[in-house]
Image (cartoon, coloured by chain):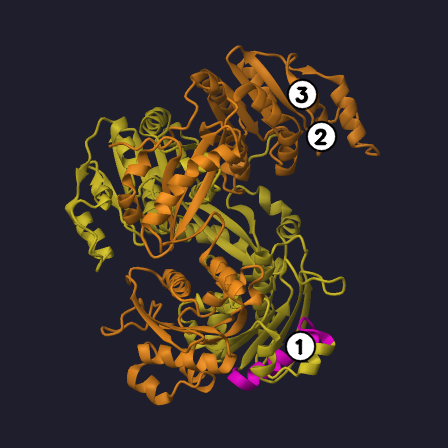
Chain colours: A orange, B yellow
Amino acid sequence: MKANLNPLSNTNPKKTVEVLSIGTEILLGNIVNSNSQWIAEELSALGLNHFRQTTIGDNLNRISNLITEISKRSSLLITTGGLGPTPDDLTTEAIAKAFNNKLQEREYIWNDIKKKLNNNSSINENSILKKQCLFPEDALIINNPRGTAPGMIWKPTKEFTVMTFPGVPEELKEMWRESGREYINQNFSDNKIFFSKTLKFAGIGESKIAEEINELLSMRNPTVAPYANIGEVKIRITAKAKNNSEAKRIIQPIKEKIINKFPTFVFGEDRDTLASVIVSELSYRKQSLAFAESCTGGLLSSFITSIPGSSKVFKGSIVAYKNEIKNSILNVPNNLLVTHGAVSKEVAQSMAIGLQKLLKSDWGIAISGIAGPEGGTKEKPIGLVYISIIGPNNKIHNIKKVYNPIRNRIDIQRLSVNECLNSLRLILLSNKD
Amino acid sequence: MKANLNPLSNTNPKKTVEVLSIGTEILLGNIVNSNSQWIAEELSALGLNHFRQTTIGDNLNRISNLITEISKRSSLLITTGGLGPTPDDLTTEAIAKAFNNKLQEREYIWNDIKKKLNNNSSINENSILKKQCLFPEDALIINNPRGTAPGMIWKPTKEFTVMTFPGVPEELKEMWRESGREYINQNFSDNKIFFSKTLKFAGIGESKIAEEINELLSMRNPTVAPYANIGEVKIRITAKAKNNSEAKRIIQPIKEKIINKFPTFVFGEDRDTLASVIVSELSYRKQSLAFAESCTGGLLSSFITSIPGSSKVFKGSIVAYKNEIKNSILNVPNNLLVTHGAVSKEVAQSMAIGLQKLLKSDWGIAISGIAGPEGGTKEKPIGLVYISIIGPNNKIHNIKKVYNPIRNRIDIQRLSVNECLNSLRLILLSNKD
């Protein structure tokens, strides 16, 4: 069975939208194309699905041919970039060429540019800036309150509109908000919006989730789509509706259905992280937290301290990387280190107990493991990790994990951090201490 | 005059390259398309100019039609995304459809996937993961050392090759470095190789560097291009040559020229990081390192412990997030905390002294600052950071930084970590203790 992943899209062929980024610097990898993402988000919010984003370099013929190509399959094209004064800024010229149009100078724009650059004596009638006053005769101008380069809204044919914006993100955004968005809303949207809710998962893989909610993946409104990254799985539910509250009503039952299927695996929504939900929960309980880290080497602490407000709950950590520190600071007996080795349940537990005595926190997590690429043995391979969590009632939870040794050092550290945070979350969930 | 932006580029029309990103989440604006930028940089380094980047959603027909379109105008297509196990992962299927090819199961890949997911009892013959073993019969497989989804190199026609990579950046990068790059180099460059040397900078901005080496930026062979990311600036020197040793001969004088212009700012080459050069230098000196972290909350430690072999030099850290820990563990006098505040030269210095007494390391770095978004005052604004570095001769170096408060918490923490590491590097450079 085929999933229909984009069933919400506007299937009226007259209303298809494309986004075109113009700039050799993008093709050379010098900058990330963040404008396309921003426009994509805006278009989604307007309920307009676009089917394609393209990036092309500063070459007159290539841009012009591409515009011709797009005008045959789409009804609206939004371009960014290539509106500046230098010779490699070719967007308006290339669009005109695609439709055999001749550009004409608009005097009021030239006056406007001169005003914007007042006191600048280098502005004469031969200035390269003059190029920014050239437009097709019947184009509407999009005023640029943040710079000298205006954009345009031009309908060279009955079925095709092109809107041009500069590549400078601040200028693009202001012009979009001031004029672009409203024009699109009035002429291209069917008065519906898109709204998404993302559920975050821990302790379960993407394929396992997808298998269990297979029937939801082919829904049409809302759509349900899983995404995965290292140590993070999420499901995005997207509704098309008249407004946000209608969208929320459409999303709610599906969201509940998914949460009910995975009651302990869903840890949050949207911008929640494992660290942020733990900081919130412990803040609410007015309880404190501390770590004793060996193999994660400070990464566990940094995940918590990346969260604003973590200072309310987080006391600090002992990064006990060398055994002498485990012994001298955390009071792990040397005979334990010799008999069981630093990577053992016994040592992790002793680290947790030492930590709690030392930092006097309500919750403590100790972790010891082998992140590689060296230090693995047959009995204790790379990827072996012991976690010990101690709570306010002094009850200790011990966890052993064996990560696949094809994982590299950084991955093993990150997965270990996730395991620590998720284990604490699950203990908190089942425990009202 | 038109800028010659990529003078090394291959202009043979038979060798044109395109990049295609597949994923509805990009069209919805949920993620930035950073993969395209990364690949663009890599292609530039290989001397291959690509003329177009396209993004398309997870729709079988649309992907398939686009592949057909691209195959008619380009000789190499690099795709990212859509190789996962879920129903919206359609890349391989769509490519096969474009050329009326039937996918076949490769048993050894299935065995490999099962091995990678060892101990996972849920993997049976009906698992959706099985999809990841399906390839055209004559496709070469690109092994994925970081995940279950392999890519492929397939030549469906004499004139067209497609290479597929996953959308997970870590997997894409490793597969590219392990196999993809070399294949492209051997098959799509014009009997010349492209060889790059990257110089890494710390403590200086991109524009400052660009101004000072302006005349080098217009060179043709080698080309010299600056890149910047948060807290990281690099210059890539790329030569086109018959072989690596000829390329190195071309690069060497330019490299020396740049290093001589910035003798203290260049800290390393290629995959060096500030953390890795410090681990190397201290290993060589057989000296140890420890940290006392407040505002960076473990991030400084994690930068060092992300480096393989860091256990040779790194003893551990005290993450003294709360003042009570600064006092009880690091022995910072309470009156110092009250009089000067935790974010002060005096407290940072006292933390460094307490750290060295406690962990007995040759080098110690203490850091205290305000990462925000709360906690700033007029006297002590967000972005204020004090660093104190103590060495084997007990000499203390104090550093004060004020980061722009428009920086967010994560940026301030990252910039602070860079400052700690770069300051230690400069002390080590001028100091043979």
- SS of the residue under disc 3: strand
The mark found on residue A88 in the picture is none
Q: Name the residue under label 1.
A: B347
Q: Is residue B348 magenta?
A: yes
User: Could you tell me which quadrant the C terminus of chain A lies in?
Assistant: bottom left
The quarter of the picture where residue B350 lies is bottom right
- Amino acid carrying mark 3 in the image: Ile
Q: Are marks 2 and 3 on the same chain?
A: yes
Q: Eyeballing the image, is B59 above or below A200?
A: above
In this view, the mark in front (2 or 3): 3
Neighbours of disc 1 within 10 Å: few (<14), some (14-19), many (20+): many
Q: What subunit carries mark 3?
A: A
Q: Where is residue A184 in the image (x, y as percent from the top left)?
A: 57, 23
Q: Eyeballing the image, is B415 above or below A125?
A: below
Q: What subunit carries mark 2?
A: A
Q: In this view, does A94 lie to the left or right of B111?
A: right
The quarter of the picture where residue A326 lies is bottom left
Q: Does the magenta stretch include residue A410?
A: no
The reply to whether callout 1 and callout 3 are in contact (CB within 8 Å) is no
**Is residue B276 at least partly visible in the picture?**
no
- Give the CA separation, mark 1 to mark 2: 50 Å
| Residue at 70% across, 21% down | A133
Neighbours of disc 2 within 10 Å: few (<14), some (14-19), many (20+): many
- Amino acid carrying mark 2 in the image: Thr
N-terminal of the two: label 2 or label 3? 3
Q: Name the residue under label 2.
A: A148
Neighbours of disc 3 within 10 Å: few (<14), some (14-19), many (20+): some
Q: Name the residue under label 3.
A: A141
- Give the CA separation, mark 1 to mark 3: 59 Å
Q: Where is residue A420 in the image (x, y as percent from the top left)?
A: 40, 66
- Amino acid carrying mark 1 in the image: Val
Magenta-tinted stretch: B340-361
